[in-house]
Amino acid sequence: MALDLNELATNMASAAKEVLTESWNEIQPLAEANFFLLAEGITNIEEKFLLGDISEEKAKKLLRMKKNTLEIALLTIEGLSLITVEQAINAALNIVQDAVNTALNFTLI
């Protein structure tokens, strides 16, 4: 079953919100937009992998690139530390880990 882009994005943003509670109201639009981009990247990885266009190794590299892009975007927000940003990203990925890994039939996250 294909991953649902909007569901992934919503679930990841909700998980990140739990980490970013103090600043969520200020950063919500930027955070949600960037978690949507990460979800979009994950669904693109899924599509390319299932079509045989990329290997597991390439999929993992693409996910790392997407995570790095998200980290940079969130670090541009004043007051967010690297540790907080990493915790938010980890929380977001943990919440979708099972669904993503099941859809791909290998451990991406």
Image (spheres, helix red, strand yellow):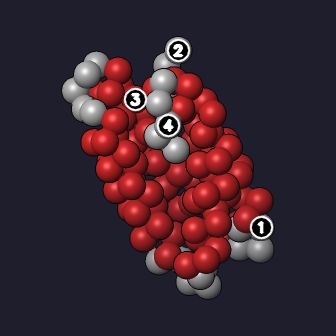
Gap in angstroms between the C-alphas marked 4 and 2: 16 Å
Gap in angstroms between the C-alphas marked 1 and 3: 30 Å
10 Å crowding of disc 3: few (<14), some (14-19), many (20+): many
The reply, left or right, for residue 48 in relation to residue 81 is left
Residue type at numbered disc 1: Thr
The residue tagged 1 is 21
The reply, left or right, for residue 51 in relation to residue 1 is left
Image location (x, y in percent) of residue 53: 22, 27
Please tell me which of labels 3 and 4 falls first in the chain: 3
Residue furthest top as drawn? 1
Which mark's residue is nearer the viewer, 4 or 2?
4
What residue appears at the point 46 percent right and 26 percent down from the top-left corner?
104
Residue furthest bottom as drawn? 79
Query: Where is 83 relative to 90, above or below?
Result: below
Which mark's residue is nearer the viewer, 3 or 4?
4
Image location (x, y in percent) of residue 54: 25, 32
Residue type at numbered disc 4: Thr
Answer yes or no: is residue 97 visible: yes
Q: Quadrant of residue 89?
A: bottom right
Residue type at numbered disc 2: Met
The residue tagged 3 is 46
What residue appears at the point 44 percent right and 57 percent down from the top-left corner?
67
The residue tagged 2 is 1
Q: Label 2 near label 3: C-beta < 8 Å? A: no
Gap in angstroms between the C-alphas marked 3 and 2: 11 Å
Which mark's residue is nearer the viewer, 1 or 4?
4
Please tell me which of labels 1 and 3 falls first in the chain: 1
Residue 107 - label: 4
